[in-house]
Image (tube, rainbow, N blue to C red):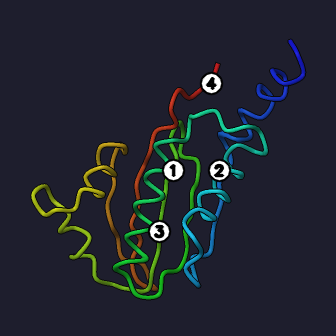
Amino acid sequence: MDFDEELARLTREPAGAAGTRVSLCGLPDLREVRSRVAESLTFGACPDGRFGGVMLVIDELVGNAYRHATAVRELQVARAGEHLLVEVSDHDPDVAAVRAGHPGSGRYGLRLVGQLSLDWGVRLDRAGKVVWALVPIQGFPAT
C-alpha cells in the first residue's frame, strides 16, 4: 500500500466521526461555509465524493436561512451512525413557513433536501428554531 492509500485509510474513520460547527452570524459566504465543513469532514484528506449530498443539503438549508430567517445563528454537522445530522439554527420561532415546503409549493430546494435525506424537519429550541436533515454518507463505510 502506498502512502496516499494509507493516509486515506487512516483518515476515513476520523473523517466519518468528525463534526463541525460554523457560526452563521454575519452571513458568511456559502462557499466559505461549505469549504469549512468539507475540510472538517475530510480531516485534511482529499474529498472523495462521499459528502456530495451533505454539501447540497447544507447549501439549501443555509441559503434558506439567509433568505427567510431572522438572525441566523449556526450550522452544526455531526456524525449520527452512518449518517450526518445537519442542523441550521436561527432566532426566528416561525416553524410554519418551513413546514409549508410541501410538493406544489414551489419550494424545490426543500424537496431536494427531502430526496437526499433519510428524514428532515424543523423544531423549536429556546432561542428560535432548528431546521435539520439526516443525510447518509455516500458509500459509508468506505472500503
Tell me residue 34's x, y (percent): 59, 58
Badge 1 vs badge 2, beta-carbon distance below 8 Å: yes
Distance CA(mark 3)–CA(mark 4): 27 Å
Residue 97 vertical position relative to residue 39 in the rendered view, above or below: below
Q: Which residue is mark 4?
A: 142
Q: Which residue is mark 3?
A: 88
Residue farthest along the left direction in this orientation: 104
Distance CA(mark 1)–CA(mark 2): 8 Å
Residue at position x 67%, y 38% from top? Answer: 47
Q: Secondary structure at mark 3?
A: strand
Which circle's residue, 4 or 2, is located before the other in the chain? 2
Q: Nearer the viewer, mark 3 or mark 1?
A: 1
Badge 2 vs badge 3, beta-carbon distance below 8 Å: no
122 vs 61, nearest the viewer: 61
Q: Secondary structure at mark 1?
A: helix
Which circle's residue, 1 or 2, is located before the other in the chain? 2
